[in-house]
Image: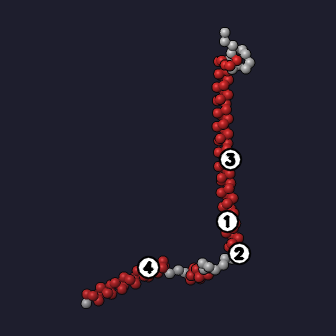
Amino acid sequence: MAWRQLFLISCLSAVVLLSSVEEKIFMQESDALNFLKKRGKWSPRSREKVNAEKRLKLQADELWREHHEEQRNEFENFVEEQNDEHAERSREAIEQWRQWHNDGLYPSYLYNRHHI
């Protein structure tokens, strides 16, 4: 008798579980029809799908190109700025050296100095 009650309770709980999960397991009829209409792995794609995929790929390529062009321009500007700063510092250092070592002769380099 106890096994019958256990069996009935388990069947009843299975029915309750299946009825609550039925919405998650089974899909709507319209979704099922759309699922069956999808092309198989080896079936040919329609021309409009091919064109849409090409447009998406071209758009992604253009975005990638623009991004990398912007990055390259920023880097080139940075390098140019660094080079300008370095040239300015070098020019200032050379000017200071020339002023300090100036003996009134032109050009004012050490090898032009006359030692007595």
Give the distance between the C-alpha atoms of the residues marked 4 and 1, in whole angstroms: 41 Å
Three-letter amino acid code at the position of disc 1: Leu
Query: Is 19 located above or below residue 94 in the figure?
Result: below
Q: Which mark is residue 20?
A: 4
Mark 3 vs mark 1: give the one in front. 3
The amino acid on which the numbered mark 2 sits, given as a three-letter code, is: Arg
Residue matched to label 3: 73
Q: Residue at x 65, y 49 (%)?
A: 71
- Which element is circle 2 on? helix
Q: Which residue is mark 2?
A: 47
- Give the structural element (helix, strand or loop) at label 4: helix
Nearer the observer, 105 or 19: 105
The kind of residue on which mark 3 rests is: Asn
* Image color mode: secondary structure
Identify residue type, mark 4.
Ser
Residue at horizontal 66%, vertical 9%?
A: 116
First of labels 3, 4 by sequence position: 4
Q: Is residue 99 visible?
A: no
Which quarter of the figure has residue 48? bottom right
Query: In the image, which disc is placed on residue 56?
Result: 1
C-alpha distance separating marks 1 and 2 = 14 Å
- Residue 85 figure quarter: top right
Please indicate whether residue 1 sits to the left or right of residue 101 in the image.
Answer: left
Query: Circle 1 sits in a helix, a strand or a loop, which is it?
Result: helix
| Closer to us: 67 or 112 | 112
